[in-house]
Structure formats: C-alpha cells, structure tokens
Amino acid sequence: MPAKGHVSVESVDGIAVLRLSNPPVNALSHGLREELMAALEHARWSPEVRAVVLAGTGNTFVGGADIREFGKPYLAPTLWQIDDALLAMGKPTVAAIDGYALGGGLELAFHCHWRVAQERARMGLPEVKLGLMPGAGGTQYWTRLAGPRSALKYLTSGDLVGAAQAAEMGLVDRVADGEVVDAALAFASLKLAEGGPLPDYNERTERLAEGTPDLFDSFVADQGKTWTGLMSPAKIVDCIRGACTRPLGEMLEAERKAFVACEASPQAAALMHLFFAERDAGKLLGDATRPPVRTVGVIGAGTMGGGIAMAFANAGYTVTLVDATVEALERGVAQIQSNYDGSVARGRTPAAKAEAAFARIMPTLTFGDVAECDLVVEAVFEDMSIKHDVIGRLDQLVAPDAIIATNTSTLDIDVLAEAASRPERVVGMHFFSPANVMKLLEVVRSGKTDAGVLQAVVALGRKLGKIPVIAGNGEGFIGNYILDAYGREMDLLVEDGASPWQVDAVMRSFGFAMGLFAMRDMAGLDVIRRIREHRREWERPGRYPLVADRLWEMGRYGQKTGAGYYVYDGRKAMPDPVMDQIVEDVARERGIVRRPISNDEIREKLLAAMVSAGQRLLDSGVAQSAADIDLVMVHGYGFPRFLGGPMHWAEQQGWGTSSKQA
Ligand code: 3H9
C-alpha cells in the first residue's frame, strides 16, 4: 500500500509493516493516532495479516506523546486506546526501533510482544524531565521487563539507554546491526514459525522479588533530596513499588491517575515551557546565512578563556589559545589539564575523550597565530581600553569576514565594536563560569552586528551544547541587569531590617540552590566592587546600598578572607555578629529605623524586582521574549527550573507580564 499521511502500511509475506511518520520526531499526535488506530484495527481483523511490525520513519521510532497536546482535553483515540488495541491484536506484534523511542513511544513498543532495536537506537522514559511521569504503562512494564532497581534509576532520572544495554537489561529482545525493519520481519517470521502463546506481562513476574522495602527506602533516602519542587519522582517510585506487590491491572490504573495529576501540575507547565523555550532560543532571527565557523581562537588563558577553549575543544574544534606571557599561558594550560583530570576522576568524561579534547587546544604566545581563524573570542581582563585594543588588533589581523567575539559581561559592545574597521563583525559571546560547564550563552548584538554573524554565533553556540539567548546591548545585557535589580533590592532589605542569612534562606526555600549573599562571598567582594566601580552604581537614581562597600573597606572579601557577609569555617558559612553591627551602623548613619521583615515580604520584593527588571528588558528590546529571560535566569542564575523562570512564574501568579517577540 502506498505511503499515506502519518501511517503507511506495507505487507511482507503476511506481516503488516506499519510505519509512523510525523516529523520531526514522530510524536504521537492526534492525527497520527487516528491513522494508527485504523491501521491496527485493519490488521486485527484482516485474515491475511499474520503479524504486525511497528516502525518509525526518518531517524526516529517515536519521540513520545505530543507535548503540545498536554493540558488540553484528550482527543480519541488516546494513546491508552492505541495501546489497548495493540494488546487486543491477538497476533504477534514486533516493534522495530531505530533512533529514539522515548516516553509514550517506548510505551508503545512495550505494548508490542517483542522489541527489535537497531544498535544505534536510544530509548528511555524521560517524562520526569517535563514534570511528568510515564502514563501509558511505562512504570509497570519496565519494572516487569528489567526489574525495579533499573526502573527506579532510569525513570526518576529520565536517562536514556542504548540498544545493547537495553537488551542486556531485558527491555529489548534483539539488537540489529543492519536495517531494523528487515530484522523485525525476520524476528516476526521466527515467532510465527515457533507458534505458542504470546507473551503476557501478567506472567512476567520473575524480576519483581527484587523490589524489597529496603530497596525503595534506601533509594528515596539517597535520591529524594535531588527532587526538590517536583512531585513526579515520588509518584514514579510509588508506581514501581506497586508494580512489585500489586496486580498489573490495578497498577496501570493507579499509574494513569498519577500521570494525570502530574500533567495538571504547575511544575509540568513550567518544565514544558522551558522545553520549548530552550528549543526556540536564538530562533527569532531572519534567514541571513554565512559559512559556518570551522576554526577558533581564544585570546586570554585565564579562568574564562581556558573554560571557553575547553567548551570549543569538547565540541571537536581545534582552538588556538593565546596569552601574552609564558607564566599566564602555563598557568592557564595547567588549569585546563587539571579540569580535565578532575572530570575524568569524577567519571564525567572518559579519559580518551578528555585527552583528545586537551590535544585540540593549541597554546601559543604569538598573537598572530589566530590570523586564520574564522572566529576569535577575546577573554582578556574586563577593562574597556584593554579589550578595545585587542579587538582593534584582531580586526587588523583576521580575514575580512572572520568574526570577532568579546566575552565581556559588563562593557558596552557598541563602544567595543568601534575598535574594528568592520563593527558589523563584532558580537558578544557572554559565557558563564565555568564556561565549559554552564549551558547559558548570551549572544549580544551591538547596534551594528550583522544578522549573519549573529546567526553563525547562535549556530555555533548550539554546537557547543549551549543555549544561545540573544540579547541587546543594554547594561548587564539580560542576566546581569536582572541580577543587579534584585541584588539591590536585597541590599536595601538588609539595611531596612532583614539579615543576609534570612534573605538567603528565603531564596533557598523558594528553590535557589544558594542565596545571593553567599554567592557574592564566593565570587569575592573585591571582584564585585570592581564591577560596581566600573558601572559607577552609586550615581544611579534611588538609594544606594552601602553595606557591600563597608565590607570591602574592611577587607572582608568573602570566602577568600574568611569573612564577608558571613564568617567562614573553611567553606562553611555562619552568621556573623560583626556583620549585624555593620548593618546597624549603616542604618543609624542613614537614619533608617530597622524593623522586622517577614519572609513573605522578602520573597515578594525580590521576585517583583526580578520581574519588573525583566519587563523593562522586554520594553527596551534588550530581551526578545519573556521565555528568553526565563532561560537566562534558569541556566545562568540558579532560578529554580521547576518554576519555569521569573516571567513564567509571574504569569502563573497572575502578575500580568507581557511577552514581546522581536
Ligand atoms: C509522554 O510521552 C507521556 C507518556 O508517557 C504518557 C502519555 C499518556 N512532542 O529536541 P529537538 C519537537 S511525554 C512535540 O530540537 P533533537 C521540538 O519542540 C513525552 N514536539 O531535536 C522541536 O520542535 P521545533 C516524552 C516535540 O534531535 C523538534 O521536535 N518524550 C516532541 O535534538 C526537534 O526537537 C520526551 O520527553 C514531543 N514529544 O532531539 C522527548 N519532542 O523544531 C522529548 C520534540 O519546532 N524530546 N519535539 O523547535 C526530546 O527529548 C528530543 O526532542 C529528541 C530529539 C531526543 C526526541
């Protein structure tokens, strides 16, 4: 039968091959489900069909339920009805998995009697990453096929497994090194020839005895702390626990109810919002094109420069890393080496991969060695005249169409771009420290940055595995502008009566991993003072908070001096009576009558400061969308992911922000 719509059907020796097609990831959207249901019914009742092979098209089996349909009324046939139709088939069914089989897609395969996977296939139940849980039998079938231990591990993390590992675990029955549909057809023929009863999950109980109370208790004790703000991991655990002790039918019903509760949760709305925002980031550009970047140079082998070089090297780029002195270069290279060693020791990077990446970094003292690069990122000291000078020199050196990127976090990119004879090729690449780890990349455009340059840098950011958010050249771009706004609010709250300890505790209880005062102590109050000096923050309208300067004057630079906002025992922060006195003194000098400030007031004021700063960024066009602001705050500034970012959060609270698209 010729291909038609979302499901094509072909018959091979009495075996119906159903191929699903819904690009880009063959999600189980309503239209696809309608056609699939019709094809399954036809296969069921057609006497010529002896068995069914279910396959995807493109390079994916099925990426899961259609995430865009969540939160809307369920349209029949639902995924549950499709799965029931597979169970009712009464003829052998084989899933032929190539590419991804995820979420509802893997569950669809679980509803087939057997699974054949191409060796490059990857599968898993990543629903937890969307604030959801498997809702079409995933918790039950995984547990019955591969045991509760692996179900706990993979379903609460959402991690994927490859075909070979899946076969070892019992999730798939055969791994194919060639065309997967051919292998599935051969497998189905074999099963037809063998005859005998079809497998029944009710009888697959051999792994369930592993599910002892101790297994679950110790798993929760160990992992529970990483589930802050999420309801689905605990529900997943409950369903796996139930799989080991309760009848299958009862637990499928329980799983479905739990899924529906997760689907309706604010966390799921927040995480799905981020899922789409992450994919939309950097997309609001025109279609200007230019050749992709192939060769990269980094100027400055300090902490940022070294991290940036690693980010490129990890993505397969050869990087020319320049510094001016032997000592600086050697120190930088030693730091890079030690970062790779640490990553290997912690089991995060295989040794061979780390070695290969390290070998791609070419240190040099010769500035001219970057002459052939398609893109050079300057990561020299954060000082206008130094950066201006470097950009001017690069402009003279590199090819006319090469891109010059600056890693500034605070300087005016329009002014920096003036150093180049072609300012249109100058762009900001604001990496976050450690640059080889943090996913956020602010791509900052000056008034003159060429659209093609912007697009090339966004594409490059994606290749580095970053989330590239485009920002205009406003002060602090997106992230630091918002950080400033709520940082100032926090400082004022402290002068007015709160303590840093209280404010940080409020932030942590909201979901931040760390409070901002503790963060400042970690970054160093001397470093932060330099930034304030550069920005001349005291000249801004409104009350200028004084405590940070007072600490700096006293040499209390934070962790590095053993005292800042807190006093330190090693890295352990403790409230400090001296700090209380400093605050009292400042308040007295300013005539402020300090008062007790409630946690609610602190939270409201901080969030209001973030959100109104975000709104100003939208109004001025520095941020292209509210979703971009959310990405910046979640990926660069520790805003709790399960709340979806400040703008999404505010909208959920009914605060009424407007999102503007460029
Ligand atoms: C579920 O299944 C629940 C069930 O248990 C129970 C139900 C009862 N739906 O990531 P990419 C879009 S929950 C709709 O850039 P890649 C995506 O937005 C679901 N759209 O590609 C993007 O659109 P655009 C469980 C989806 O190659 C485009 O596809 N499944 C879906 O880097 C390309 O995406 C998951 O959680 C979807 N399910 O990665 C899997 N998936 O082009 C979620 C993707 O307009 N998906 N899109 O920007 C992924 O992890 C990755 O997309 C995947 C491909 C690995 C599949």
Image (cartoon, rainbow, N blue to C red):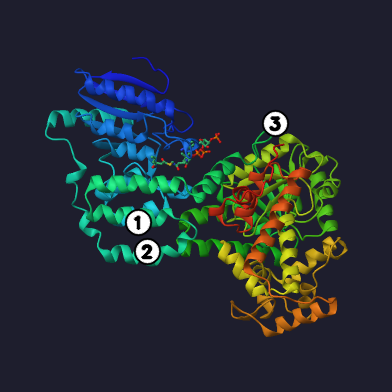
Instruction: Residue 612: give x, y in percent of width and height.
Output: 73, 52
Within the image, what quadrant is residue 434 found in? bottom right
> Does residue 243 appear left or right of residue 316 in this picture?
left
Which is more N-terminal, label 2 or label 3? 2
Image location (x, y in percent) of residue 325: 74, 64
Q: Residue at x 72, y 69 (%)?
A: 493
Marks 3 and 2, Cα distance to the nearest angstrom?
Answer: 48 Å
Residue of label 3: 286
How much space separates mark 1 and mark 3, taking CA atoms? 46 Å
Q: Quadrant of residue 299?
A: bottom right
Pointer 1 or 2: first along the chain: 2
Label 3: how many residues lie within 10 Å, few (<14), some (14-19) or many (20+)?
few
Q: Is there any visible trace of residue 595 in the rendered image? A: yes
Q: Is mark 1 within 8 Å of ligand 1?
A: no
Task: Name the residue carrying label 2.
Answer: 220
Which of the two residues, 507 or 21, is positioned nearer the viewer here? 507
Tell me where residue 373 appears, x and y as whole percent.
Answer: 70, 44
Which residue does the image show at 44% across and 33% down from the upper left? 27
Check disc 1 and report its element: helix, strand or loop.
Answer: helix
User: How many numbered discs sit on the rendered protein?
Assistant: 3
**In front of the other: 302 or 287:** 287
Kind of residue sitting beneath label 1? Val
Judge whether 113 appears above or below 568 on screen: above
Residue, disc 1: 237
How far is the residue under mark 1 from the one under mark 2? 8 Å
C-beta proximity under 8 Å, tags 1 and 2: yes
Q: Quadrant of the N terminus?
A: top left
| Residue 553 seen by the camera | no
Residue type pointed to by label 2: Val
Question: What amino acid is labelled 3 in the image?
Answer: Gly
- Camera-side mark, 3 or 2: 2
Task: Give coordinates of residue 86: x percent, y percent.
Answer: 27, 31
